[in-house]
Image (tube, grey):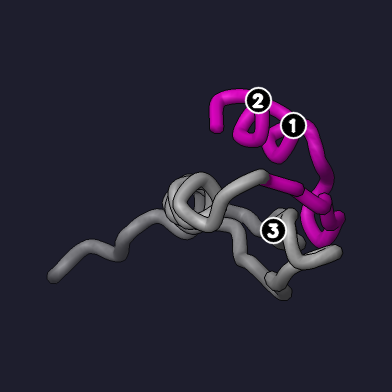
Amino acid sequence: MITVGNILATLSTGERMKVIAASQETLDDITMAVKSAGSTVVSQGTEGGERYYLIAEKAEKQEPSQPW
């Protein structure tokens, strides 16, 4: 997940990357990390029945607005 975060940080806004994992649980963890970084998962699925993938798109992380 650290490597995915580092690579995602170097992308320009709007660029996409594909991540392949051996298990759905690993992909779920990566999905949470991508979303917490303010980016989005635009697609996910399986390849060959044994590998899982997601495509993440870099977005600018939005800072929470002030409540007042």
Near mark 1 (Cα within 10 A), the count class, few <14, some 14-19 or many ≥20, is: few
Q: Is residue 61 left or right of residue 6?
A: left
- Give the residue type that dot 1 points to: Ile
Magenta part of the chain: 1-21
Could you tell me residue 13's position as x and y percent? 78, 54
> Where residue 59 sits in the image (x, y, percent)?
66, 58
Specify the quadrant that holds the N terminus: top right
Please, what secondary structure does the residue beneath circle 2 have? helix
Distance of mark 2 from mark 1, alpha carbons? 6 Å
Residue 22 appears left or right of 13: left
The residue located at (82%, 64%) in the rendering is 47
Tell me where residue 24 appears, x and y as whole percent: 53, 57
SS of the residue under disc 1: helix
Decide which of tag 3 and tag 1 comes sooner along the chain: 1
**The disc label shown at residue 7, or none:** 1
For discs 3 and 1, the disc positioned in front in the rendered view = 3
Return the residue at label 2: 3
Whether the residues at callouts 3 and 1 have beta carbons within 8 Å, the answer is no
The image shows residue 62 at horizontal and vertical percentages of: 47, 59
The stretch drawn in magenta includes residue 15: yes
CA gap between label 3 and label 2 equals 17 Å
Q: Which residue is mark 3?
A: 52
Residue 56 visible? The answer is no
- Quarter that holds the C terminus: bottom left
Number of numbered callouts drawn: 3
What amino acid type should be assigned to the residue bearing mark 3? Answer: Tyr
Res 53 → quadrant:
bottom right
In this view, the residue in front, 60 or 6, is 6
Residue 15 seen in this snapshot: yes
Bin the neighbour count of mark 2 within 10 Å (Cα to Cα): few under 14, some 14-19, many 20 and up. few
> How far is mark 3 from mark 1, CA to CA?
19 Å
